[in-house]
Image: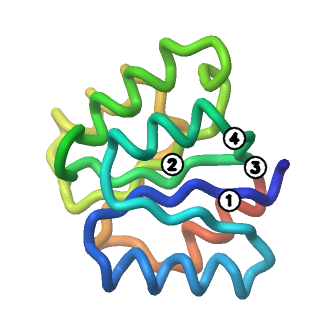
Amino acid sequence: MKNKILLVEDDLFLGKLLKKKLEISGFDVSFLKDGEDALSLAKKEDFGAVVLDLMMPKKDGFKVLEELRADEKTKDLPIIVVSALNSEEDKERVNKLGANKYFVKSDSQLAEIIDYLKKI
């Protein structure tokens, strides 16, 4: 389902805000707060994309990204990272792990993320 988004964000305020904005934009959003639950759900359901934070409890976004890319069912799933991490090393690591796009929270508007999701 192309407009079904898995949103993985441990910041409850930001997660609820992004979920609401995505729903207003026509997306069906499943919102989870940790990487373990996200991996489980991503392998069970069909999503059009994943919006993934990096710093999370239980399993961080780097590991989630790595495991999604290693799984046959989710290896081609578009994954958009939205993180507070802004170092070149983090960006390079995320790219090597196979993320489609990297947004830095402090440098990005919600509208940019939504526009990108609409394009894919």
> Of the numbered discs in the image, which one, if any, rests on residue 80?
2
Q: Amino acid at mark 1?
A: Leu
Question: Which image quadrant is residue 12 in?
Answer: bottom left
Mark closest to the chain's N terminus, 1 or 4? 4
* Residue 28 spot, x, y in % from top left: 73, 68
- Of label 4 and label 3, which has the lower sequence position? 4
Give the alpha-carbon distance from disc 4 to disc 2, as whole Å: 18 Å
Q: Residue at x 55, y 42 (%)?
A: 41
* Front one among 100 and 15: 15
Q: Which mark is residue 120?
A: 3
Q: Residues within 10 Å of mark 2 (few under 14, many from 20)?
A: many
Callout 1 environment at 10 Å: few (<14), some (14 to 19), or many (20+)? many
Judge by depth and name the residue closer to the eye, 34 or 83.
Answer: 34
- Please say if the residues under marks 4 and 2 sit with CB atoms less than 8 Å apart: no
Q: Secondary structure at mark 3?
A: loop
Query: Which callout, 4 or 2, points to the residue nearer the camera?
Result: 4
Residue at the image point whose x is 49% and y is 26% from the top: 68
> Upstream in the sequence, badge 3 or badge 2?
2
Q: Is residue 73 left or right of 63 when viewed as pictured?
A: right
Q: Secondary structure at mark 4?
A: loop
**Image quadrant where residue 114 sits:** bottom right
First in sequence: mark 4 vs mark 2: 4
Give the residue furthest to the right: 1
Numbered tag placed on residue 117 in the rendering: 1
Amino acid type, label 4: Glu
User: How far is the residue under mark 3 from the one under mark 1?
Assistant: 5 Å
**Circles 3, 1 touching at the beta carbon (< 8 Å):** yes
Q: CA distance from mark 3 to mark 2?
A: 10 Å
**Quick one: SS at disc 2?**
strand
Residues marked 4 and 3 touching at CB (< 8 Å):
no
3D distance between C-alphas at marks 1 and 4: 18 Å
Q: Which residue is denoted by mark 4 in the rendering?
A: 45
